[in-house]
Amino acid sequence: MNAAVLPPVAVVGGGLAGSLAALALAHRGFAVSLLAPPAAAEEREPSELGTATALSYGALAGPASWQAWRDLETVHGPLGLRAATLLRHGDPWLDRLPPGLQAWPSRLLGFGRVDPAALLGALPAALAAAGVQRQSAVVRALEPRHPGWRLCLDAATGPATLETARVVLAAGAGSRALWPDLPEQLRVSWAGVLTLPRVPPGPWPAHAGRGRVVQPFHWQRPLLEGRALSLQSEDWIVDAGLAPRDEGLVVGQVTVVRPGTASGPPPDPATMEERLRDGLRRLDPALGALAGTYRQVPVAFCVGGEPLVGPIAGAAGLWAFTGFSAAFSRVPIRAVDLAAWMAAEAEAG
Ligand SMILES: Cc1cc2nc3c(=O)[nH]c(=O)nc-3n(C[C@H](O)[C@H](O)[C@H](O)COP(=O)(O)OP(=O)(O)OC[C@H]3O[C@@H](n4cnc5c(N)ncnc54)[C@H](O)[C@@H]3O)c2cc1C
């Protein structure tokens, strides 16, 4: 898009936010390095290096987000965008209709889905084609150099440090460990799901097996996140839902939010799984007994719902891109905004 080569930028984090920020910045003409742990480290638990993107339903709502993904696929090739409909249980009106009709309004509202496995599978080639230098590394520290930044890396191969003019912190739940002075509204929840390699029998799995995303009409997670600033002790909820995942399903989700800004140690997986299964049983007893593998990840969010996008106060050259709600809908659009903002700032000198 921009023929001029702008200053080097290092993006920390290879989930949805970091990857789409890197693509947008490269498209603007920045020389971009993307630093993310190898996939094996992201999948290892317990860890702030887990990626919420991998366990997501990938649902997106609204014509603007659908169009943003279409635009991305036009430039970068297939990234997992799928037509999908939303089926909400507990809806006082739609519950009276047959499922085929229930799903219909979501088509009008531009509902869709990005398959996280397809996205994460396609990203390495898309990033390489866009000129992004991807390095498998955990960033252990960010050091201001006045001007610029030095990143201290933990990497099996390659250099142990990286000097760069600007840094974008898109490390999800790992962001605060790198820059503790982030705004207080940035928090971390822990989310747990069951993953199933195949679609089991039963009416709800069959919906998800046909590409529908099943979600509750009354979401509890946003209410719990909204109470994060006043929590005195940890609290949890279950939002029973299902979505397609590869040839199988992801069935969730149990969410724990704690007081304070630290993600803390991962919650006890056995307790979390039992809570999840109890919540699923309330939708359908058969769901509580599904033979799936329990997995959990930390998820960054912002109290109030407005993500951190922009320069970080008191840290020249350090930018934030994290804490999204409705991330699959908002990240593609805000990544373009971020890149435009950083280009304008760089060009202004
Ligand atoms: C079960 C579930 C269902 C969901 N469903 C939806 C949905 O339907 N629609 C929707 O929009 N959102 C959904 N979400 C939320 C959405 O998935 C997340 O908000 C989004 O994926 C976050 O992306 P991210 O890139 O900010 O964070 P992540 O995906 O967590 O990525 C952070 C990255 O930073 C890396 N990192 C951390 N620390 C370091 C470090 N020191 N050095 C280098 N790298 C580091 C991590 O390894 C990881 O790669 C769901 C989440 C869950 C758990």
Image (cartoon, rainbow, N blue to C red):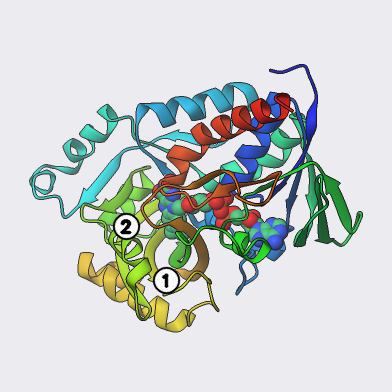
Q: Secondary structure at mark 1?
A: loop
In the figure, residue 138 lies in which quadrant? Answer: bottom right
Please provide percent x and percent y for residue 184: 48, 62
Q: Please give the name of the residue rendered at 38% of the width and 60% of the height, measured from the top-left corner.
A: 200
Residue 197 appearing in the image: no
Residue 128 vs residue 235, the one in the foreground: 235
Residue 234 occupies which quadrant of the picture?
bottom left
Relative horizontal placement of residue 139, taking residue 215 as reference (left or right)? right
Vertical comparison of 165 with 232: above or below: above
Residue drawn at point x = 14 percent, y = 50 percent: 91
Residue 249 horizontal/vertical position (percent): 43, 56
Left or right placement of residue 134 versus residue 21 in this view: right
User: What residue is shown at x 34% (from left), y 32% (from top)?
Assistant: 62
The residue depicted at 34 percent of the width and 35 percent of the height is 111
The x, y position of residue 299, in whole percent, is 49, 61
Closer to the camera in the image, 47 or 288: 47
Quarter of the figure with residue 345: top right
- Residue bearing the label numbered 1: 291
Q: From the image, tell me which residue sits under label 2.
A: 222
Residue 15 visible (yes or no)? yes
* Quarter of the rendered structure image containing ligand 1: bottom right
Name which of mark 1 and mark 2 comes first in the sequence: 2
Residue 43: horizontal and vertical position, in percent?
63, 64
Tell me the CA gap for discs 1 and 2: 28 Å
Which quadrant holds the C terminus? top right
Q: Nearer the viewer, residue 117 or 171?
A: 171
Kind of residue at disc 2: Pro
Does the numbered disc 1 mark a residue whose Cβ is under 8 Å from ligand 1?
no
Q: Rate crowding at label 2 as few (under 14), some (14 to 19) or many (20 or more) other CA atoms within 10 Å.
A: some
Q: Is 222 placed above or below 82 here?
A: below
